[in-house]
Image (tube, rainbow, N blue to C red):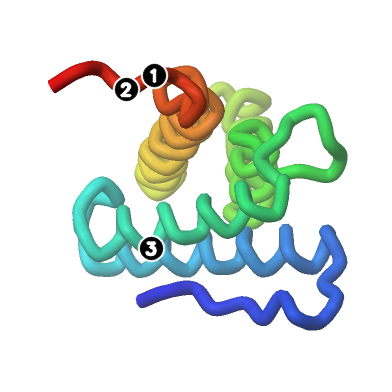
């Protein structure tokens, strides 16, 4: 399933961030409901398409605000899932985080690991694919 966002009409940065965050949440929730890892298809491919959309819009650049770098993705999804509140309340009550909270944190970490890897690879692509560099002889 390819993410289709019509970019021929003006889209605010905030609305695009909201769109991508909502789709990320949908993919993660679907994988969780199906008890499938995010690293497997179709989830990995759908997440990567969302990364490409975010990156193409310049949203993965951590120097811009607002953005969708890995820290922002973590903040947004943790807030949506109530993870920050759960961690704070469990710490205050000196009790363990719920099994559901731990499961969501694991899913979030899986997503963030892939997101960070894609950011790293995408940022370093030009170093290894310089079109101006001479081709090696065959």
In screen coordinates, is 114 left or right of 18?
left
Residue at figure coordinates x 21%, y 59% from the top left:
41
Which label lies toward us, 3 or 1? 1
Q: Which x, y percent locates residue 68?
A: 68, 44
In the picture of the structure, the residue carrying the numbered disc 3 is 46
In screen coordinates, is 64 left or right of 101?
right
Q: Which x, y percent locates residue 5?
A: 62, 77
Q: Please indicate, yes or no, whether residue 98 appears anywhere in the rendered image.
A: no
Residue at figure coordinates x 25%, y 46% from the top left:
39
- Is 102 or 108 nearer to us in this picture? 108
In screen coordinates, is 16 left or right of 132?
right
Classify the position of the C terminus by image quarter.
top left
- Is 107 or 59 nearer to us in this picture? 59
Q: Which x, y percent locates residue 98?
A: 43, 42
Which label lies toward us, 2 or 3? 2
In the picture of the structure, the residue carrying the numbered disc 2 is 135
In the picture of the structure, the residue carrying the numbered disc 1 is 134
Q: Quadrant of residue 15?
A: bottom right
The residue tagged with tag 3: helix, strand or loop? helix
Q: Which x, y percent locates residue 112?
A: 47, 36
Marks 2 & 3, CB-CB < 8 Å contact: no
Q: Is residue 136 above or below residue 53?
A: above
Q: Residues within 10 Å of mark 1 (few under 14, many from 20)?
A: few
Marks 2 & 1, CB-CB < 8 Å contact: yes
Q: Earlier in the sequence, mark 2 or mark 3?
A: 3
How far is disc 3 from disc 1 in space, using C-alphas? 36 Å
How far is disc 2 from disc 1 in space, using C-alphas? 4 Å
User: Which label is found at residue 59?
Assistant: none
Residue at figure coordinates x 41%, y 53% from the top left:
48
Q: Please indicate, yes or no, whether residue 26 appears anywhere in the rendered image.
A: yes
Q: Residues within 10 Å of mark 2 (few under 14, many from 20)?
A: few
């Amino acid at each position: 399933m390819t993410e289709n966002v019509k970019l021929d009409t003006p889209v605010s940065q905030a609305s695009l961030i909201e769109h991508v965050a909502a789709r990320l949440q949908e993919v993660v929730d679907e994988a969780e409901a199906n008890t499938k890892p995010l690293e497997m298809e179709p989830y990995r491919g759908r997440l990567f398409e969302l990364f490409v959309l975010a990156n193409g819009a310049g949203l993965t650049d951590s120097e811009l605000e607002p953005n969708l770098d890995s820290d922002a993705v973590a903040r947004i999804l943790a807030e949506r899932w109530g993870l920050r509140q759960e961690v704070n309340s469990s710490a205050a009550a000196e009790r363990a985080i719920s099994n559901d909270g731990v499961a969501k944190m694991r899913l979030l970490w899986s997503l963030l690991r892939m997101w960070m890897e894609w950011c790293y690879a995408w940022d370093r692509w030009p170093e290894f694919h310089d079109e101006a560099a001479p081709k090696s002889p065959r």
